Image: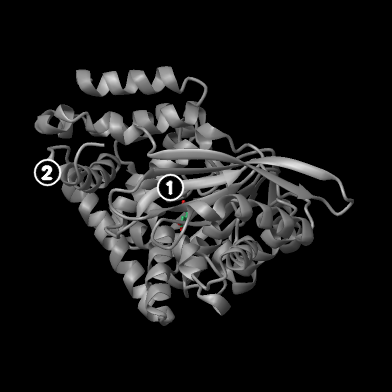
C-alpha cells in the first residue's frame, strides 16, 4: 500500500482501536483510493486524507426520559457532523442498544461518500442513541424523542444539519422529533428533518426510496450482463423498511424474493414474498408490531422457518443483505460462492466484513455492488424532500420516482466511469469509493486548508 495511505490507516487504527467498525470502513475506502493518491500528489501535500477521516465535529448528549411506571432512565445521544464540504450534514439517526461512538463514526464516514455519490448538495452526518426501542410504549417513545430533540435542536437546521431516520427511527419517531423542534423553535422549518409524514412535508416515495433505488441500481448491474430482472430469484435478509421497498419494486418488475430474516432466523418462501401484495405489506405489520421476529411470516403464510440461521445457504440468482452491519463474514461468503450466486448486491450499511468482501470480489463470475451506492436512494429522496420543503411545494409520486431512478442510474454510471478512469476495469466497489471521494476532495481543495 502507498506510504501515505498506510500512515493514515495506521493513525486511525491506533487512535480508534476501540472502534473496530470505524477502522473497518476507513480501511475499505482507503484501499480503493490507492491509484487516486498516486496520481494526485496534491492531495498528500495538503494532508487531505487525515482531514477526511477526522470528523469536523462529534458530540454526545444526555437524554433523560421517564417510563410509564415513573422510573427515570438515562441514555447517551450522539451526532457526528462528519464532512460538510459539499452541503449541510445529512444522515439518519439510529436508536438501537448496540449504538456506540464507533458505530456512529462508521455510519457517518460511509454517509459522506454515499451522499457525495448521489451528486446532490448534501454533506455527511449521522447520529442516534443506545436507547432500545424494543417493548417501549408509544408514550415512552414520544418522551424519549422529545428529550433527544431538546438536547440536539441548537445544533441542527435546514441549512446546517438535517437528520432523518435509520434503524429504530421511522416516521413515528420523526414526527415526535419534529413536534419538539417546532415547539422549541416556534417556527415551521420542516426542512430540518426528512422522512416526515406526508401531512407535514414528507415526500412521496421516501418510505420506498431505499428499496426502489436498490432495485434500480440492480437493473443497471443486470443490464451490463445483458440480463433482465424478470424471473430472477433474490435472497434478502432483514424485514424492515428497506426490504419492504425491495419486495414492492421486485413484485412490480416480476422478480421473486424468496427469503427474509430477523434476529430469530430466516424464512424461505418458494413462491416468493413477492407473490402477493398481502405478503409484501405484511412486512410492515411485522415491523410495526415491535416484536422484531420474522417467524410471524412463516406462521401466517405456512412457509418454512429456520430458527437461528441466516439465509445465505439458499440458492438464488441474487443475494441482497439488507439487515445489519457485518452480517456476511467469511463463512457466509464461502456459502454464497459455493452456491454460485451471480450477483452480490449489498444494501445494508457495511453488511460484509472486509475479509469476506475481498473474498467475494475475487470470485470469477460474481458481480459485487457496494451498499454506499446501492442504498443511496433513501438519502437522495431525503434531499428531494428538503428541496420540496424549501420551495413549499409537493411533488407527485411520479416526479419523485423519476428523479430517484435517474439518480440511481447516474450513481451506477459514475461508479463504472471512475473505476475505468483509474484502470481498474469493471469494479463497482472501487468505483463508488473513488467517485464519492472525488467530489468531496474537489470541494475541500477549493475551500482552503482547515
Ligand atoms: N439512514 C439512511 C441512510 O443510511 C437515510 C439517511 C437520510 O435520509 O438522511 O442513508
Horizontal side of residue 322 vs 99, given as left or right: left
Q: Which residue is mark 1?
A: 125
| Label disc, if present, on residue 421 of the rendered structure | 2
The CA span between labels 2 and 1 is 29 Å
Q: Residue at x 33, y 74 (%)?
A: 402
Q: Residue at x 33, y 48 (%)?
A: 84
**Image position, residue 320 (x, y; %):** 46, 49
**Image position, residue 175 (x, y; %):** 62, 66
Horizontal side of residue 30 vs 187, given as left or right: left
Q: What element does badge 2 sit on?
A: helix
Q: Quadrant of the C terminus?
A: top left
Q: Is mark 2 within 8 Å of ligand 1?
A: no
Q: Quadrant of the N terminus?
A: top left
Task: Classify 444 as above or below 161.
Answer: above
Q: Is mark 1 within 8 Å of ligand 1?
A: no
Kindly indicate the quadrant of the structure image that contains residue 37.
top left
Task: Classify 285 as above or below 38.
Answer: below
Q: Nearer the viewer, residue 53 or 414?
A: 53
**Image position, residue 225 (x, y; %):** 25, 54
Can you see residue 394? Answer: yes
- The colour scheme of the drawn protein is one colour
Assess disc 2: are there few (<14), some (14-19) or many (≥20) residues with their C-alpha within 10 Å of its C-alpha.
few
Kindly indicate the quadrant of the structure image that contains residue 180.
bottom right
| Label disc, if present, on residue 373 of the rendered structure | none
Amino acid at each position: 500500500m502507498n506510504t501515505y495511505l498506510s500512515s493514515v490507516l495506521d493513525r486511525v487504527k491506533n487512535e480508534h482501536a476501540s472502534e473496530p467498525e470505524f477502522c473497518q470502513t476507513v480501511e475499505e475506502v482507503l484501499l480503493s483510493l490507492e491509484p487516486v493518491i498516486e496520481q494526485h500528489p496534491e492531495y498528500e501535500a495538503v494532508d487531505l486524507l487525515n482531514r477526511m477521516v477526522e470528523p469536523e465535529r462529534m458530540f454526545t448528549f444526555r437524554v433523560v426520559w421517564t417510563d410509564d411506571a415513573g422510573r427515570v432512565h438515562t441514555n447517551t445521544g450522539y451526532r457526528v457532523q462528519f464532512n460538510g464540504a459539499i452541503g449541510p450534514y445529512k444522515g439518519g439517526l439510529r436508536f438501537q442498544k448496540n449504538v456506540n461512538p464507533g458505530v456512529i463514526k462508521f455510519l457517518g464516514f460511509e454517509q459522506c461518500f454515499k451522499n457525495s455519490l448521489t451528486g446532490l448538495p448534501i454533506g455527511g452526518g449521522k447520529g442516534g442513541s443506545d436507547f432500545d426501542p424494543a417493548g417501549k410504549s408509544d408514550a415512552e417513545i414520544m418522551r424519549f424523542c422529545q428529550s433527544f430533540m431538546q438536547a440536539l435542536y441548537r445544533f441542527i437546521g435546514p441549512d446546517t444539519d438535517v437528520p432523518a431516520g435509520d434503524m429504530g427511527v421511522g416516521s413515528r419517531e420523526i414526527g415526535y422529533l419534529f413536534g419538539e423542534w417546532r415547539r422549541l423553535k416556534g417556527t415551521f422549518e420542516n426542512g430540518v428533518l426528512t422522512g416526515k409524514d406526508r401531512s407535514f412535508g414528507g415526500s412521496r416515495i421516501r418510505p420506498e426510496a431505499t428499496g426502489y433505488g436498490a432495485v434500480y441500481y440492480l437493473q443497471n448491474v443486470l443490464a451490463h450482463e445483458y440480463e433482465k430482472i424478470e424471473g430472477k430469484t433474490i435472497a434478502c435478509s432483514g424485514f424492515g423498511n428497506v426490504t419492504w421497498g425491495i419486495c414492492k419494486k421486485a413484485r412490480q418488475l416480476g422478480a421473486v424474493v424468496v427469503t427474509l430474516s430477523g434476529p430469530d432466523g430466516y424464512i424461505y418462501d418458494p413462491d416468493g414474498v413477492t407473490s402477493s401484495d398481502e405478503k409484501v405489506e405484511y412486512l410492515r405489520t411485522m415491523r410495526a408490531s415491535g416484536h422484531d421476529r420474522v417467524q410471524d411470516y412463516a406462521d401466517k403464510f405456512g412457509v418454512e422457518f429456520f430458527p437461528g440461521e441466516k439465509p445465505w445457504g439458499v440458492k438464488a440468482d441474487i443475494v441482497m443483505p439488507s439487515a445489519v452491519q457485518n452480517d456476511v463474514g467469511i463463512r457466509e461468503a464461502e456459502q454464497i460462492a459455493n452456491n454460485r450466486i451471480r450477483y452480490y448486491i449489498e444494501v445494508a450499511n457495511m453488511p460484509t466484513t472486509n475479509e469476506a468482501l475481498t473474498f467475494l470480489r475475487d470470485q470469477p463470475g460474481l458481480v459485487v455492488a457496494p451498499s454506499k451506492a446501492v442504498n443511496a436512494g433513501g438519502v437522495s429522496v431525503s434531499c428531494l424532500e428538503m428541496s420540496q420543503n424549501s420551495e413549499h411545494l409537493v411533488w407527485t409520486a411520479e416526479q419523485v420516482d423519476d428523479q430517484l431512478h435517474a439518480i440511481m442510474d447516474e450513481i451506477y454510471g459514475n461508479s463504472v466511469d471512475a473505476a475505468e478512469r483509474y484502470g481498474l476495469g469493471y469494479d463497482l466497489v472501487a468505483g463508488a469509493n473513488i467517485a464519492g471521494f472525488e467530489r468531496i476532495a474537489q470541494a475541500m481543495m477549493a475551500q482552503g486548508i482547515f
